[in-house]
Image: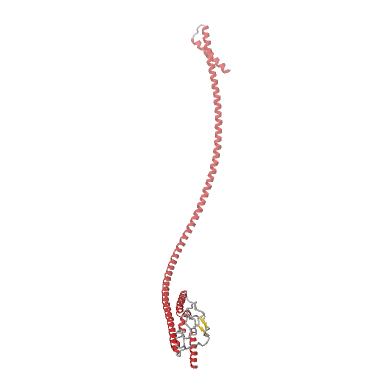
Amino acid sequence: MSSSHGDKRSSDVEMGEATSPTPIPSSPVEVPAYVADHLSFRERLVRRQAEKEQVRAGAEFPSSSALAIAPGHGTEVVTPRGAGTLAGLGIPDASALPAGSSTTLILVEDKERAADSMPPPPARKEIVLVLRAPSVVPVAQPKGRKRKFTKGGDGESSQQGGSSIASGLRGKFMSLIDGMISECGSETSRLAGELLELQGRWSETEAMLTAVKDSHSVKVSKLKVAIGELERDLGKTASSLLKEKKVRKAKSSEVRRLQRQIKGDAGLASRGIREATDVLRSEFQARLAKISAFLGSLEYICNFWDLALATIEGGVAVVQSFQSERPKMPDCLAAREIWQSWMEISISSQLT
């Protein structure tokens, strides 16, 4: 009886050591962005696999929960939860199973067979712990309490059932780890290919940048030359504009002078015109006066001729009367008398 209790105590200690989790490093090393993305992808993958395994394990073993107290048997059940995958596998404990069932774990005398019924070693769990999945929860440390194994009537069959379950779980765990490792390798190769592609693109981008810089420098030099030419042209244009402005000022001053001269000449011409018109008007008036005087003299001459004709007619009438009264005289004497009388009349008319 004492030997059985000693073997039981040693098996409990070995199980406690085997199920003790590896501590998670508190300060992870800084990694590149693509490695962090890969790790986050791995974590999501691990969580999904763990959920699937938990669903399957829950369907096979509905009594395997995280932490439970069996008040009927008076024993404490502590289920270890590892990083990412152990929490989803749900390994059943002996005290959580009813006694005499086909899945009840019993005391194994052989230590090698007891090791087969234990969870995988910590070295296997370390691969999963490095992923730092967010589903990791603190692990309840074993308190060194002895686990009690009951020997049922069918002890050998219970032992074989437990070892088969443990080996099946360990196979699933190993296949999951191998799948994750293969996926990690494929993902790493894919990331390496993408990294090479990015390096090629980066080299192409650098070549394009250098070409753009060269073309930009050439354009800048050309623009500087063009700017210098434009500045020279602007200087020439400014000087020509100043000269043109001076010429325009001179022309405007000349135009103003000519305008003033034209205005002065116009004033002088108007004054000359006025003076000439005044002179012409005075001359015209004088000539009109002369014409009026001449007309008066003509009128006087007309009157004089009328008077002379009347006088001549009177003289002729007198001569005719004398001829009728006197005897006829010679013609010369008559003409002489007529002439004398006419002269007298004219002289008298002039005197009057």
- The spot of residue 305 in percent (x, y) is 53, 18
Query: Please, which colouring scheme is shown?
Result: secondary structure
- The spot of residue 138 in percent (x, y) is 52, 80
Picture mark count: 0
- The spot of residue 128 in percent (x, y) is 46, 80
Q: Is residue 141 above or below residue 332?
A: below
* Residue 160, picture quadrant: bottom left
Lateral position of residue 124 relative to residue 311, left or right: left
- The spot of residue 187 in percent (x, y) is 42, 75
Q: Nearest the camera: 12 or 218?
A: 12
Q: Is residue 57 above or below residue 151?
A: above
Q: Is residue 237 above or below residue 87?
A: above
Q: Nearest the camera: 250 or 65?
A: 65
Determine the residue positioned at 55% across, 15% down: 345
Q: Is residue 158 above or below residue 40?
A: below
Pick out the residue farthest to the right: 352
Placement of the C terminus among the 4 image quadrants: top right
Determine the residue positioned at 53% across, 17% down: 306
Q: Nearest the camera: 112 or 336?
A: 112
Pick out the residue farthest to the bottom: 2
Q: Nearest the camera: 48 or 216?
A: 48
